[in-house]
Image (cartoon, rainbow, N blue to C red):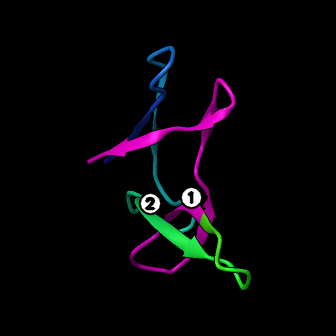
Amino acid sequence: MATYQCASCGMAVNASCAKCDTPLVNDILITEDGANVQISKCPDCEGKIKSPMCCGADMSCQI
C-alpha cells in the first residue's frame, strides 16, 4: 500500500484506487510547459490524481 507522509507534521495516509482497489504509486506528470507535477496513479487502470497535500506541500510517498 502506498503511504503518503507529510514531512512537516508527520500526518500519513494510505491511498488505493476506488475503482479497482489497487494501491496507488507515486509518479511525475510533465506538463506542456515542462513543469513537473507530483501525482498518484493506478498501475492497473491508469487513473491518476494530484498527490495528496498537507501543510501546503505535496506529501512524499513511501511504499
The image position of residue 19, as x and y in percent, is 56, 67
Q: Is residue 8 left or right of 56 when viewed as pictured? A: left
Determine whether 7 is above or below 25 in the image. Answer: above
Q: Is residue 55 left or right of 39 when viewed as pictured? A: right
Question: Is 10 a magenta residue?
Answer: no
Q: Is residue 27 left or right of 58 when viewed as pictured? A: left
Can residue 20 be seen in the rendering of this structure? no
Residue at 43% x, 41% y is 60
Report crowding for label 1: few under 14, some 14 to 19, many 20 or more residues within 10 A (C-alpha): few
Q: Is residue 57 left or right of 63 when viewed as pictured? A: right
Q: Nearer the viewer, residue 23 or 36?
A: 36
Question: Is 46 a magenta residue?
Answer: yes
Q: Nearer the viewer, residue 58 or 3?
A: 58
Report crowding for label 2: few under 14, some 14 to 19, many 20 or more residues within 10 A (C-alpha): few
Residue at 43% x, 59% y is 24
Residue at mark 2: 21
What label does residue 18 carry, if any?
Answer: 1
List the single residue furthest toward the left.
63
The image position of residue 1, as x and y in percent, is 31, 48
List the single residue furthest toward the right.
33
Q: Estimate the spatial distance between the alpha carbons at disc 1 and disc 2, rounded to whole Å.
A: 5 Å
Three-letter amino acid code of the residue under disc 1: Ala
The image position of residue 42, as x and y in percent, is 46, 70
The image position of residue 25, as x and y in percent, is 39, 61
Q: Are marks 1 and 2 in contact (CB under 8 Å)?
A: yes
Looking at the rendering, the stretch of residues picked out in magenta corresponds to 37-63
